[in-house]
Image (cartoon, helix red, strand yellow):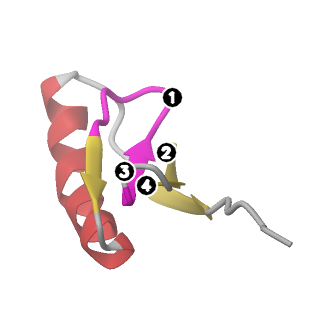
Amino acid sequence: MEYVVRFNWDDEAKVWYAINDYLPLALESESLDELMSRVRTAIPEMIEVNNLEKAKYLYFFMENREEVTV
């Protein structure tokens, strides 16, 4: 089983947040590295609690959108 985790930047709140379509993932952090570490810890716990198929792979995708002023 593979789980895709998307890391997005919230420019208004100035934090990274993680989302996944199948897991009730609600984590955020000012540091992307810290958030990735938290996700690596949380996902196995969420899989176990929700009786989901164990993950063989985690795919991380990051997105950062910024407004450009000219």
The span picked out in magenta is: 14-26
The answer to whether residue 31 is left or right of residue 64 is left
Q: Mark 3 or mark 2, which is nearer the start of the sequence?
A: 2
SS majority, magenta = loop
Q: How many angstroms separate mark 1 from mark 3 (CA)?
A: 22 Å
Label 2–label 4 contact, CB within 8 A = no
Q: Nearer the viewer, mark 1 or mark 3?
A: 3
Quadrant where the C terminus is found in the figure: bottom right
10 Å crowding of disc 2: few (<14), some (14-19), many (20+): some
- Under tag 3, what secondary structure? loop
Q: Mark 4 or mark 2, which is nearer the start of the sequence?
A: 2
Callout 4 amino acid: Lys
User: Which residue appears at 78% of the width and 68% of the height?
Assistant: 69
Q: Mark 3 or mark 1, which is nearer the start of the sequence?
A: 3
- Under tag 2, what secondary structure? strand
According to the image, label 1 marks what residue?
Answer: 21
